[in-house]
Image (cartoon, rainbow, N blue to C red):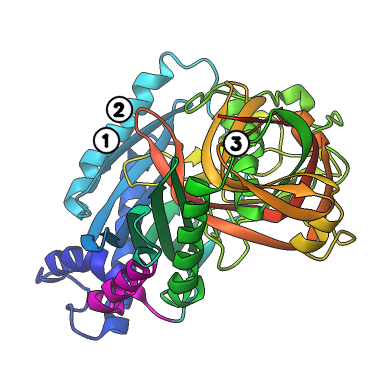
Amino acid sequence: MIYEIFKKVVNSVLKNKNSDYLLFDTNLNRTKEVILNYMDDFIAKGLEKAEKGGASFAEVRVFGYKYETTSTRDGEVENAGIYNDRGYGIRVIKNGAWGFASTAVIEESTLEQIAKAAIKEAEATSKVQKNPVELTEEPIMKDNYKTPFKKNPFDVPIEEKIEILKMSDSIITEKGNMVKSRSNSMTFYNVYLDYGNSEGTRITQEELFTGANVSVIAIAEDNQSRSEGLFEMRGYEFIDKYDFEATSDRIAKEAIILATEAKAPKSQKTAFILEPFQLGLTIHESCGHPTELDRVLGWEADFAGTSFLTQDKLGSGYKYGSEKTNLVCDPTMPYVLGHEKYDHEGVATKKFDVVRNGIFEGYQSDRQTAKIVGLEHSNGNARIARYNRIPLVRMSNLYLEPDTEGPKDLDGLIEETKEGIYGIGWKSHSIDDKRTNFQFSVQIAYEIENGELGKPLKNTIYQASTPQFWGGLDLMTKEWHIKGLGPSCGKGAPHMQAIWISHGGPYSRFQDINIFSG
């Protein structure tokens, strides 16, 4: 990624006869060293110009990504391309107010203009801002970090990727004429952050992640769809792990079951079991967004509002769920989408409790919001999705801890459930503007009768309020999984940022949940 993003910059700068840098050559290791040295100097000069303009704090954030997406639809190649996005931004504090400016041109000749634009914005904002910006004090970091992988997906021939997708398509097609549409894809992202601030922090962070998806539409008595897509912070080795062959067979069969056999559930209040992926979506909406501190402070209301978790609930013993509810944010987890060693304010990420034994324990925060509510340090949740965006408080890896004394796996959990419903996969969701009342639907569900899976169900919706739902958590498995959802979490209108995240946990049972058909 470094090579791709900065080759043009290095060429333009290093051809200057007065440059002290080594000329660009074909030795990749040497090239990276040259580029890193150049970026050190680039960031230092950007910070210097911001401080000369009167900034009390400044940061330069060079950010970019390369992604490749390959897809087929109904047996034909739909997309096969590589895309790039790169640039840098300067953010400053002057007169107690933020200012920000950015450009896609990563050249020293632009630093003066961008620094001045950021300073000018801060000066204007300070005239109407009531409370000055204050940040938590954080340790100075100096590091160069890269997520591990075994096989670079960008080195794999596109022909090999298309062959796998067409194999997947043929498996689905073999299921018969009830299958009316099918699509398959694999996506690869290489994300790069080069960051420095006026306090002395200087980090470089590079991430590689891979995703795959299979989707089927079947039509018989009904029109139904079934899909499954997952991401991990790995290289091409994830494609082998995903197993397109087995996944395609299962997803196609389930789509046909939905279109032919499945019945709508009757309206009822019953035990409801969720698998880790759909559990993760429920965590995302009912636990992730309401614990973002900018929503709590009323700064953010995009995509379904603010939060019911007002500041008075922090440290008050507020009951979020049953004693079995332990929700943890841990971006330090390797190989999980959303893993980062540092957030995009240069703060080292950490594992922390959001809910422990059913009691609300902590918010997701950045340096400014943490300071406002009296926290000593940021929890390291500041992230951006593009170079021309400011950091927002964002989720990373938020999951439900398993029950070490619960059943071993899903079979054991079902055996211990006399009557209920087991729901699989995300279909749709809706939640109110405080993140309390919600209703979600699953792609496919099954009745549970006398400890065994029964008839398939379609159009199954579960409805609850957040504290009621988590208060009904009574049994979980020892087995658990955390699932990468891809760059799918949107926030920040009008300049929306889609961020990469993971959620999950054990197979989990919730009591007295309202079920009906949509």
Residue type at mark 3 is Ala
The residue labelled by disc 3 is 264
The picture places residue 126, in percent across and down from the top left corner, at 42, 20
Question: Considering the image in quadrants, where does the N terminus appear?
Answer: bottom left
Residue type at mark 2 is Lys
The residue labelled by disc 1 is 116
Q: Is residue 91 visible?
A: yes
Asked which secondary structure carries label 2, the reply is: helix
For image coordinates 71% across by 30% down, the residue present is 466
- Seen in the picture, residue 340 relative to 300 is either above or below; the reply is below
The residue at the far bottom in this view is: 27
Q: Are marks 2 and 1 in contact (CB under 8 Å)?
A: yes
* Drawn side of residue 503 relative to residue 197, left or right: right
Magenta span has 153?
yes
Discs 2/3, front: 3
Span shown in magenta: 151-171
Q: Are marks 3 and 1 in contact (CB under 8 Å)?
A: no
- First in sequence: mark 3 or mark 1? 1
Q: Residues within 10 Å of mark 3 (few under 14, many from 20)?
A: some
Q: Residues within 10 Å of mark 2 (few under 14, many from 20)?
A: some
For image coordinates 28% across by 78% down, the residue present is 160
For image coordinates 33% across by 69% down, the residue present is 170
Which is nearer the eye, 95 or 145? 145
The picture places residue 135, in percent across and down from the top left corner, at 58, 37
* Drawn side of residue 73 relative to residue 304, left or right: left
The picture places residue 105, in percent across and down from the top left corner, at 19, 50
For image coordinates 60% across by 24% down, the residue present is 297
